Amino acid sequence: MSSPRDPNSDEAALCQLSNGEEGLISRVSAASPELKRRLYALGFVPGASVTKLRVAPLGDPLQVRVGGSSVSIRAREAAAILVQPRPPSNAPLQQKPSL
């Protein structure tokens, strides 16, 4: 399973997002160049929007949406994709309280 998010960091691994949570890919830190090329070919590139859709019952694989495509990837591959989580695009924006 994935480890908990670091509250002091603005990045999280894709596998750490909750189902339905969105983020922008900040970097791909795959150990092997082959995996990094494969993830890039699937659309997991810095700046791309990604949404974690669901996880299989045993925790692997994960289904995610990147660009306009729905892709299933292994949890260890999702751990190599670092994202900046953001609120869902259909969620209302929270306003700062007025002083």
Image (tube, rainbow, N blue to C red):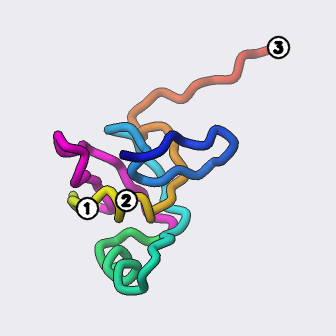
Q: Earlier in the sequence, mark 2 or mark 1?
A: 1
Q: Nearer the viewer, residue 91 or 58?
A: 58
Q: Residue drawn at (42%, 82%), measured in percent from left and top? A: 32
Residue 8 image point, x, y percent: 69, 42
Residue 36 image point, x, y percent: 40, 79
Compared with residue 86, is residue 24 higher up or lower down, i.e. above or below? Answer: below
Q: Earlier in the sequence, mark 1 or mark 3?
A: 1
Q: Earlier in the sequence, mark 3 or mark 2?
A: 2
Does dot 1 land on a helix, a strand or a loop? strand
Residue 93 image point, x, y percent: 54, 29
**Number of numbered markers:** 3
Compared with residue 99, is residue 76 higher up or lower down, i.e. above or below? Answer: below
Q: Which mark is residue 59?
A: none
Amino acid under disc 2: Ala
Does dot 2 land on a helix, a strand or a loop? helix
Q: Which mark is residue 73?
A: 1
Callout 2 touching callout 1 (CB < 8 Å)? yes
Amino acid under disc 3: Leu
* Residue furthest top as drawn: 99
Q: Residues within 10 Å of mark 3 (few under 14, many from 20)?
A: few
The residue singled out by tag 2 in the image is 78
Magenta residue span: 46-67
- Quadrant into which the C terminus falls: top right
The residue singled out by tag 3 in the image is 99
Callout 1 touching callout 3 (CB < 8 Å)? no
Q: Residue drawn at (23%, 51%), measured in percent from left and top? A: 60
